[in-house]
Image (spheres, rainbow, N blue to C red):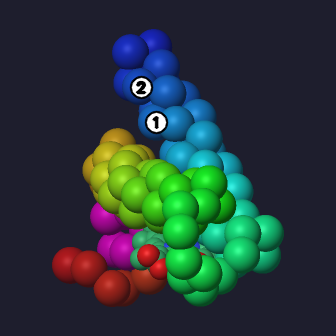
Amino acid sequence: MTTHRSTKLWAVNVLTFVFLCILSVTGLMNWLLLPRGYRGGESVWLFLRHILQDLHQWSAIAFLVLVAIHMALHWSYIQSNLRRHGLLK
Ligand code: HEM
C-alpha cells in the first residue's frame, strides 16, 4: 500500500468514526433526552430538536458517502474475496 493511499484510508476511517459518533449522539439525544410534542410557544428544546434532526440527517449522508469511499478504496480486496468464495467470476 502506498503512503498516499494509506493516509487517505486513515482519514476516511477517522471521519467515518467521527460521523458515526455525531449520528449516535444526535439520534439518541432526540430520542431519549429532548421533550416530544409541540406545547405551544417557542421553546429552546424544540429549536434544539430541529437542529439535531438536521445534523443527524446531513451526518447520515456524509457517513454513507464515506462508507462508499471506504469500499471503493478496498474494491480490489472485496473483488478478490468474492472471487475466492465463487460469488464473482
Ligand atoms: C446512515 C445512518 C443513519 C441514517 C440514514 C439515519 C436516519 C434517521 C432518520 C431519517 C431519522 C428520523 C429523523 C426525524 O424524525 O426527523 C432518524 C432518527 C433516529 N436515529 Fe438515525 N440514522 C442513521 C444512523 C443512526 C445511528 C448510528 C444512531 C445511533 C446509534 C441513530 C439513532 C437514531 C435515533 C435514536 C432516532 C430517533 C430520534 C427521535 O426519536 O426523534 N441513527 N435517523
Please tell me whether residue 78 belongs to the stretch shown in magenta: yes
Which amino acid lies under the numbered mark 1 shown in the image of this protein? Val
- Res 12 label: 1
Residue 22 locus on image (x, y percent): 61, 50
Q: Where's residue 70, x and y in %?
A: 41, 48
Q: Which residues are magenta?
A: 77-84
Q: Is residue 51 magenta?
A: no
Residues packed near mark 2 inside 10 Å, few (<14), some (14 to 19) or many (20 plus): few
How would you rate the neighbour count of disc 1 (Cα within 10 Å): few for under 14, some for 14-19, many for 20 or more?
some
Which residue is rendered at x = 60% and y = 81% of the image? 39
Question: Would you place residue 16 above or below residue 68 in this image?
Answer: above
Magenta stretch, main secondary structure, is helix
**Which residue is at a point 66% across and 50% down the rendered structure image?**
21
SS for callout 2: helix
What secondary structure is found at the residue carrying circle 1? helix
- Pointer 1 with pointer 2, Cβ within 8 A: yes
Q: Specify the quarter for ligand 1.
A: bottom right
Q: Residue at x 71, y 75 (%)?
A: 35
**Numbered circle sitting on residue 8:** 2
Judge by depth and name the residue closer to the eye, 14 or 49. 49
- Camera sees residue 63: no
Q: Which quarter of the rendering shows the N terminus?
A: top left
Which residue occupies the extreme right position in the image? 33
